Image (cartoon, grey):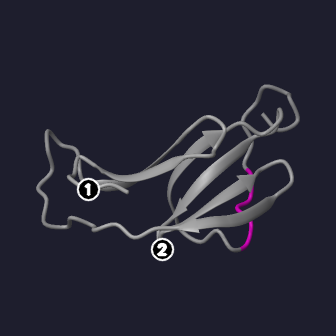
Amino acid sequence: MIGGDGGVREVPVPAGVGEIASLAPVSGAGRPVWLVLGADGTIGRWDMAAGVFEPVAATTLATESDREPWTGHRCRRRLHASGDGMFAAVVNDYGRYGR
């Protein structure tokens, strides 16, 4: 938690992030840091404590809009990352494709 008070607080999204498709937590030397997948395919590192967003990669992935929901789950893009943030994968959860 930012501030260490154990509570939940709202944190503004920095300029440049845009619409968020998915988030993945990564280590940040005791600070809350996330990898962010934007709706436009941009992957960035967001240091929440500093309020800094830095684009680090971009990806394209087929949307699979023709897929029917499976057991109530809709196909959507998801970002998975290693704990240190050095490796990431973008996949269609309940779909067929990934990068």
* Residue 20 pos. (x, y %): 53, 62
Camera-side residue: 93 or 82?
82
Tell me which residue sits at (56%, 38%) in the image.
82
31 up-or-down from 47: above or below: above
Above or below, 37 against 82 in this view is below
Query: For the magenta stretch, what is the residue range?
Result: 11-15
Amino acid type, residue under disc 1 in the picture = Tyr
Q: Which residue is more in the foreground, 74 or 37?
A: 37
Residue 97 among those drawn in magenta? no
Residue shown at the point (28%, 68%) measured from the top left:
62
Q: Quadrant of residue 1?
A: top right
Residue 82 in the image: above or below residue 23: above
* Percent position of residue 36, x then y: 59, 56
Q: Is 28 placed above or below 58 here?
A: above
Q: Is residue 62 found left or right of 85 in the rendered image?
A: left
Q: Which residue is tagged 1?
A: 97
Q: Quadrant of residue 12?
A: bottom right
Residue at 74 percent of width and 63 percent of height: 53
- Find numbered disc 2 in the image and state the secondary structure of the residue it sits on: loop
Residue at horizontal 58%, vertical 66%?
Answer: 57
Within 10 Å of disc 1 (Cα), the crowding (few <14, some 14-19, many 20+) is some
Instruction: Measure the C-alpha gap from mark 2 to mark 1.
Output: 17 Å
**Amino acid type assigned to the residue bearing label 2 in the image:** Asp
